[in-house]
Image (cartoon, rainbow, N blue to C red):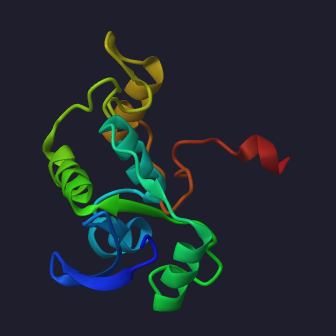
């Protein structure tokens, strides 16, 4: 039945899985916590990747969610969950582990492509000013104060 759940050995860990039509369907949130959490931003990123890979996870029924909660595979307050075949999870895992080595993400601009203030036509005036300050081309401050030899304050004392 679709509610036949067991803890299976998968990639060196015990993962909750349902046996459906001879295939094990892994609890996706648990598999994410065990294998993907350190590789991707979050579960939402995983769902985006699955969509791009044309993989459709199976939505758990109410009884399956109850069983997964009972096993501790999902948090007590969670009332929905998705399942993924081992084959599909392997595809997802491969994508997560190889995607970081690709320099440019297809269809999207690269992250942090340019620094703020930089443009393809060269640095902006604001960036040139910052650079000149960093290079020491401005009057220095001593202990946070302007040196007495640089400013005439006599008119302030009158």
The answer to whether any part of residue 137 appears in the image is no
Residue 46 rendering spot, x and y as whole percentages? 39, 52
Pick the residue in front: 74 or 137. Answer: 74
Asked if residue 66 lies left or right of residue 16, the reply is right
The answer to whether any part of residue 48 appears in the image is yes
Residue 86 rendering spot, x and y as whole percentages? 23, 63
Q: Residue at 39% across / 65% down in the picture?
A: 28
Q: Quadrant of residue 76?
A: bottom right
Q: Residue furthest top?
A: 121
Residue 21 rendering spot, x and y as whole percentages? 30, 63
Asked if residue 146 lies left or right of residue 104, the reply is right
Q: Is residue 51 above or below residue 6?
A: above
Pick the residue in front: 126 or 113. Answer: 113
Q: Residue at 34% across / 84% down in the picture?
A: 6
Q: Is residue 146 above or below residue 20?
A: above
Q: Is residue 95 above or below residue 41?
A: above
Which quadrant: the N terminus?
Answer: bottom left
Q: Is residue 132 above or below residue 59?
A: above
Pick the residue in front: 1 or 129. Answer: 1
Q: Quadrant of residue 26?
A: bottom left
Q: Residue at 37% across / 33% down in the picture?
A: 115
Q: Residue at 32% across / 9% down in the picture?
A: 121
Residue 151 rendering spot, x and y as whole percentages? 60, 42
Q: How many marks?
A: 0
């Amino acid at each position: 039945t679709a509610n036949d759940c067991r803890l299976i050995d998968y990639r060196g860990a015990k993962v909750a899985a349902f046996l459906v039509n001879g295939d094990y369907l892994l609890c996706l949130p648990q598999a994410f916590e065990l294998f993907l959490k350190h590789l991707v931003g979050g579960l939402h990123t995983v769902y985006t990747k699955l969509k791009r890979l044309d993989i459709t996870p199976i939505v758990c029924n109410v009884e399956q969610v109850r069983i997964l909660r009972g096993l501790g595979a999902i948090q007590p307050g969670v009332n929905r969950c998705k399942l993924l075949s081992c084959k599909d999870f392997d595809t997802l895992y491969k994508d997560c582990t190889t995607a970081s080595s690709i320099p440019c993400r297809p269809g999207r601009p690269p992250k942090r492509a340019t620094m703020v203030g930089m443009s393809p036509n060269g640095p902006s005036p604001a960036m040139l000013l910052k650079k000149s300050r960093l290079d020491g081309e401005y009057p220095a401050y001593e202990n946070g104060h302007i040196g007495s030899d640089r400013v005439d304050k006599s008119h302030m004392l009158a």
